[in-house]
Amino acid sequence: MAYTGISANPFLVPQSIWQSPIQGASAFNPYAVQQPLQQTQQLLQVVAQQLQQLQQLEYVQQHQLQQLQQVVQSIPAQLVQLHLAQQTQQQPFTPAGIPMSPLWSASQVGSQPNYVM
């Protein structure tokens, strides 16, 4: 089916829009051209500001990433220290490295042999 007067191509513009200022000098409005240019310039300024903000955020994120990497790299050493500290608390050693035990066990303190009077 063919429709008359309707174009399937959205890029086809009626010829009257493309008239030169010379052909329709009374219809030419310089403000109509200037306003889109100002809007484009404002948008470019906004885009430049947003780009600068994104670059600042990227810098902050890179700094935070470096700090996080340092923390992650220190975790294994801290785990080793924690493990050694737990072992030391569970088995106290004398300076000579001999495990400490009480001189008298609980069963020896309260009981004496029957032959001692």
Image: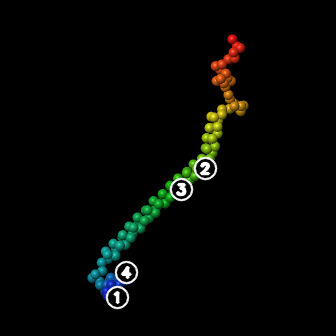
Q: Which residue is mark 1?
A: 2
Mark 2 / mark 3, whichever is N-terminal = 3
Q: Which amino acid type is marked by label 4? A: Pro
Are the residues tagged 3 and 4 within 8 Å (C-beta)? no
Mark 1 / mark 2, whichever is N-terminal = 1
Are the residues tagged 3 and 1 within 8 Å (C-beta)? no
Q: Which residue is mark 3?
A: 62
Which tag is nearer the camera, tag 4 or tag 1? 1
Whether residue 20 is visible, yes or no, is no
Q: Helix, strand or loop at disc 1?
A: loop
Measured as percent of width and height from the top left, residue 17 is found at: 32, 82
Are the residues tagged 1 and 2 within 8 Å (C-beta)? no
Q: Which residue is mark 4?
A: 10
Q: Which residue is mark 2?
A: 73
| Residue 14 as seen in the image, left or right of residue 107 | left
Q: Residues within 10 Å of mark 1 (few under 14, many from 20)?
A: few
Q: Helix, strand or loop at disc 2?
A: helix
User: Eyeballing the image, is 114 above or below 94?
Assistant: above
Are the residues tagged 4 and 2 within 8 Å (C-beta)? no
Mark 3 / mark 4, whichever is N-terminal = 4
Q: Helix, strand or loop at disc 4?
A: loop
- Total count of labels: 4
Q: Disc 3 and disc 4: Cα gap in Å?
A: 46 Å
For the point 66% across and 24% down, the residue is: 105
Q: Disc 1 and disc 2: Cα gap in Å?
A: 71 Å
For the point 65% across and 23% down, the residue is: 107
Q: Which amino acid type is marked by label 1? A: Ala
Check the picture and name the quadrant holding the C terminus.
top right
